[in-house]
Amino acid sequence: MDFWSLIGIWVAAFLTLSIYSVLYQDNPFYRFAEHLFVGVSVGYGIVLSIYQGFIPFAWKPFVAAVEGESSSGFIKLIPICIGLLFFARLSPRHTWLIRYPIAILIGFGSGIAIPNVLRANIFEQTRGTIAPFAAIHAGTLSGWGTFEAILMVIGVICTLTYFFFSVEHRGPVKWLSKVGIAFLMIGFGSAFGNTVMGRVALLIQRVDFLLSDWLNIIS
Amino acid sequence: MNMDRRIVFILVALAVIIPMLLSVNLPVSVSEPTQKFYDYVEALPAGSTIMIAFDYGPSSLAELNPMAKALLKQCFDKDIRVIGITLVVDAPTLVSDLIQEVAAEKEAVEGEDYVFLGYRPGDVQVILGIGTDIASVYDTDYNGTAISEIPMMQNITNYDQIDLLVDFASSDTIESWIIYANVQYNQKIAAGVTGVIIAQMFPYLQTGQLVGLLSGILGAAEYENLVGAPAKGMQWINVESFVHLLIVVLVIIGNITYFIHRAREE
């Protein structure tokens, strides 16, 4: 292992221990590591955005257009200029100019998103909820599959009922919404359990690093 | 009863360190979503092309790197060409190192068996741009080589030549891929995601919008098992099991203590 890799491992080990030291109590090592992490993350992100976003998509076309190397570069000047209007926010007199790029972004975003989102998240999901019943009708779904399909429809109806506020939740509606709450709780429980699994995995990875790369106790 | 929470931290630390030192091996079974993912890739003929979007940064590396590594090994073993990209700004260096490491192990050749195109800003614009012409978004690869000079990219223009898109994601990028690449271009998509977002991915699997799904470190372990290349995923899931067991025990103890305390107060 070369010298700089070794230095890197020791720095990483020091920062890992500094971050975990907050579990005992707040201390200067933790605050140093936390601030360093935020600073490095932001700095790295900005530099990469400049080199992989701004320079190839804004600066180079601009220079090419000015120097006459590419006539198509002038077309790219239009979005570049619209993008620059975001900086109008810095001048109180010209703040109103920021409405134009925001309006274009919202217009483009909505236009491109609404049909696709409707199809992906509404139509396809509705089809997915109903489709198993076609299989039940055709006799191709197993007993467990049939149970799952019915349970899913009950869950969808009850959960949607819980979020239906135009009718007072009394009588059957109340019971349907109560079942809906149960489905929601199961969903939240599943999400929380998976989140715990994810967070523990992060800890395991750091401990693995400390024991193998830093201390060489395990291979 | 109040217990110093630092005792819990110490117990969790011990539950991680002891099994890791003892190298405990527990059996790993394979779930249906992981099996579907593996079967789909396995069914692709040699010479097929997979685009892998490595949409995660260092904070999610622990869960997603092992599964990405296992998939890359499977692809290189089967002579499936890999196009790597990322929509996450702090991912390129990590991804480049990961691909190079697996490629070196499997003797895959850059430009012929795989290419890493790097990062481009603007999630939706990148996804839509690839649907029109990859070169309109990525004129060069991560190393600066013009895309027109990369041998494996000669016959690849857009999603039409990509047999499967895999997104390893720690955020909602997977939904963007589904909403735009799947809906608009009918691109087949599989995903490997962190535990935090797995619950919201299952509806897409049920509808077939995802052909397969890997769930956090568990998915990584299952995939390593299927590929026959046990590595960090299988090692870590064993440790994870002990921590989960500890958490379950602590939850039970906490509830029993709570009810005893409440009964005494009444």
Image (cartoon, coloured by chain):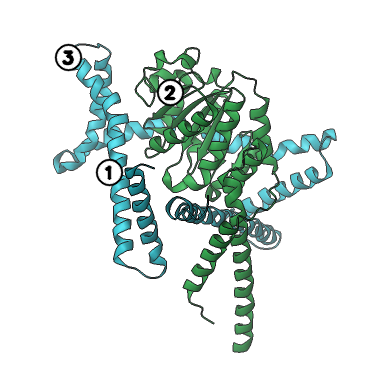
Chain colours: A cyan, B green
Kind of residue indicated by mark 1: Gly
| Residue at the spot of label 1 | A43
Q: Does the residue at mark 3 contact the one at mark 1 (Cβ under 8 Å)?
A: no
Would you identify the image quadrant in which residue B123 lies?
A: top left
Dot in front, 3 or 1: 1
Q: In this orientation, which residue lies closer to the viewer: B174 or A9?
A: A9
Percent coordinates x, y for residue A141 in the rendering:
81, 38
Discs 1 and 2 share one subunit: no
Where's residue A139, x and y in %?
85, 35
Q: Which one is nearer the viewer's eye here, A88 or B17?
A: B17
Mark 1 or mark 2, which is nearer to you? Answer: 1
Whether residue B141 is situated above or below residue B255 in the rendered picture: above
- Whole-angstrom CA distance, mark 3 to mark 1, is 31 Å
User: Secondary structure under badge 2?
Assistant: helix
Label 2 lies in what chain?
B
Indicate which disc residue B129 carries: 2
Image height check: is A7 above or below A17?
A: above
Q: Where is residue B59 in the image (x, y as percent from the top left)?
A: 43, 48
Residue A95, horizontal then vertical, whole percent: 20, 40
Tag count: 3
Q: Looking at the image, which residue is at 42% across and 45% down?
A: B58
Relative height, residue A9 to residue B247 (above, below): above
Q: Name the residue under label 3.
A: A67
Residue B189: name its quadrant: top right
Q: Which residue is drawn at 59% across and 88% down?
A: B265
Cα–Cα span, label 2 and label 3: 27 Å
